[in-house]
Image (tube, rainbow, N blue to C red):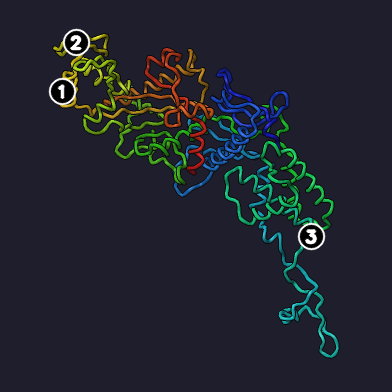
């Protein structure tokens, strides 16, 4: 088993490379490296706990993605990954963008151990039915056909098939060692541990380890591995009878303790653990987050993820692409030219209903009046729009009404007023609330999941230019609904604990608009740095 403290980390802080591999493999120098996703610029170096936690969560993520991509369910509809080819220890298929994806999710040193545990019954291994020289006289009638008949009606029975312990002490210790490793792994993988496994693991720990020694503890990792290797070697030397189950356990433990990763070939075609196109995983993670947090507001999604054990798609775009859409939503995502339709598919479309209610409540949610100085009968104040895009017309209308008032006051700029009578301010606010319908159509949120580096959005590059054009085409197709549209690019980002404390809703932060490529700003597209850890947590809890 490799040491998470010494595992080489490689961060993706550039966008020049088109390789979107995430996982563990050997680099050009033959070193085993853990290649992290885009957006992990702030991930800590040489941090045992952080690296261990990320590895096991990525392990669970890849296993879930593998299951969702390949498993058969009762729903006969396509899952979007129909052409799945089984490779050695992995899978090969094409994603919805027709890009080839190679997924190798098997780490032999872990997989063999868990498969062995799933295949072998501990209670059967601990106690078997075997030949015994003792005689149970209550069952003697069942052995008359095997008896040796002697003179004077005497019969002789030399053995019976009775329950007896067939594994010697050292073999029993092998089972305890096996259970200890399995329980340590299942704990890190957040799997349920059977009580019997816990019992045998505890027995092994009491007999062979010091207090609090563990396989996945930074301080005790190396000493624990050495102790386990010593116990395994001692078992092998002392065990006389070694049956098939013994060798199955022994080889699984030996591979775990002495193996690293099955990566003999350092080139691109060599064996690795991970995925060649992580964007496919990121899209499924984002779609799962969306359905977990805002399912009731989603009206269209280009996905067919498995969510709570069911395929999410309920329709097809262009006749064959599986998608999700609300029953009453008329799919507008096509460009028609000369009688022919060219279908397009945004990642997600949902409608916000944040500002529903009476005009008084909506006014307070949309507009804020900041009093700078109170003179008693008059005030100096500033009008601020809380939502800077969706309700711009209300904000402008209110400022215009205040300026058109005949009261003695001095407007400063667009939204600031001095020496304004309090009674007149309340009068104009009441006029707006009573005479203008503030229940405008809810804004549409158009999400596009992007697995690219944040630096791509700072200056010109052909990829972003194409993405902007696609996003504007989606907005154009939605024009018939006559609703305000908020376009958002959604990219992965690793946040430290201190950064998470100041995040809104613990999910994302904007890239500063002043640093964005001018065409993104002109197109009014927001770029979210989404909290990768939070989204991954939701993905793993919605099988």
Vertically, is 301 above or below 193? above
The percent coordinates of residue 310 (x first, y second) are: 44, 45
The percent coordinates of residue 431 (x first, y second) are: 15, 23
- Do labels 1 and 3 touch, CB within 8 Å? no
Q: Quadrant of residue 326?
A: top left
Q: Provide the secondary structure element on which disc 3 rests.
A: loop
Neighbor class of circle 3 (other Cα within 10 Å; few <14, some 14-19, many 20+) is some
**Depth order, front residue of 306/134:** 134
Q: Residue at x 37, y 18 (%)?
A: 524
Q: Does residue 320 show up?
A: no
Instruction: Provide the residue designation for mark 3.
Output: 168
Q: Quadrant of residue 506?
A: top left
User: On the rendered image, what quadrant is the N terminus found in?
Assistant: top right
Vertically, is 265 above or below 305? above
Q: Provide the secondary structure element on which disc 1 rests.
A: helix
**Depth order, front residue of 86/177:** 177
Q: Earlier in the sequence, mark 1 or mark 3?
A: 3
Q: Residue at x 42, y 33 (%)?
A: 302
Instruction: Provide the residue designation for mark 2.
Output: 409
Instruction: Provide the residue designation for mark 1.
Output: 431
């Amino acid at each position: 088993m490799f040491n998470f403290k010494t595992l080489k980390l490689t961060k993706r802080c550039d966008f020049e490379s088109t390789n979107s591999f995430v996982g563990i493999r050997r680099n050009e120098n033959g070193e085993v490296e853990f290649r992290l996703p885009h957006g992990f610029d702030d991930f800590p170096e040489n941090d045992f706990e952080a690296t261990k936690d990320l590895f096991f969560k990525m392990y669970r993520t890849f296993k879930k993605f593998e299951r969702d991509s390949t498993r058969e369910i009762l729903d006969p509809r396509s899952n979007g990954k129909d052409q799945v080819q089984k490779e050695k220890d992995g899978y090969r298929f094409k994603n919805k963008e027709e890009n080839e994806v190679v997924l190798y999710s098997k780490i032999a040193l872990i997989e063999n151990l868990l498969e062995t545990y799933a295949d072998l019954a501990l209670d059967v291994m601990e106690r078997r039915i075997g030949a015994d020289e003792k005689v149970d006289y209550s069952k003697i009638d069942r052995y008359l056909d095997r008896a040796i008949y002697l003179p004077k009606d005497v019969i002789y029975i030399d053995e019976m098939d009775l329950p007896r312990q067939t594994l010697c002490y050292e073999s029993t210790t092998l089972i305890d060692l096996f259970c200890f490793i399995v329980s340590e792994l299942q704990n890190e993988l957040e799997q349920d541990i059977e009580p019997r496994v816990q019992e045998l693991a505890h027995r092994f720990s009491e007999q062979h380890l010091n207090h609090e020694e563990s396989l996945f503890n930074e301080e005790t990792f190396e000493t624990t591995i050495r102790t386990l290797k010593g116990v395994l070697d001692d078992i092998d030397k002392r065990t006389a009878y070694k049956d098939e189950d013994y060798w199955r356990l022994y080889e699984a433990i030996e591979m775990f303790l002495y193996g690293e990763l099955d990566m003999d070939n350092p080139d691109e075609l060599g064996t690795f653990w991970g995925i060649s196109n992580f964007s496919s995983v990121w899209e499924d993670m984002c779609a799962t987050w969306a359905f977990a947090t805002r399912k009731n507001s989603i009206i269209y999604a280009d996905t067919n993820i498995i969510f709570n054990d069911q395929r999410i798609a309920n329709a097809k775009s262009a006749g064959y692409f599986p998608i999700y859409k609300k029953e009453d939503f008329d799919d507008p995502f096509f460009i028609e030219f000369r009688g022919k339709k060219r279908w397009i598919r945004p990642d997600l479309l949902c409608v916000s209903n944040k500002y529903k209610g009476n005009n008084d409540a909506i006014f307070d949610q949309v507009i804020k009046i900041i009093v700078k100085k109170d003179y008693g009968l008059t005030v100096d104040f500033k009008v601020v729009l809380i939502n800077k895009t969706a309700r711009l017309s209300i904000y402008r209308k209110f400022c215009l009404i205040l300026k058109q008032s005949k009261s003695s006051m001095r407007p400063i700029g667009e939204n600031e007023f001095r020496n304004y009578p309090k009674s007149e301010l309340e009068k104009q606010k009441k006029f707006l609330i009573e005479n203008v319908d503030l229940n405008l159509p809810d804004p549409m949120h158009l999400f596009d999941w992007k697995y690219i580096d944040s630096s791509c959005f700072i200056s010109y590059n052909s990829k972003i230019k194409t993405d902007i054009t696609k996003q504007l085409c989606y907005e154009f197709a939605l024009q018939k609904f006559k609703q305000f549209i908020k376009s958002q690019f959604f990219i992965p980002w690793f946040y430290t604990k201190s950064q998470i404390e100041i995040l809104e809703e613990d999910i994302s932060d904007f890239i500063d608009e002043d640093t964005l490529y001018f065409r993104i700003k002109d197109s009014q597209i927001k770029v979210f740095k989404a909290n990768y850890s939070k989204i991954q947590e939701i993905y793993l809890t919605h099988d």
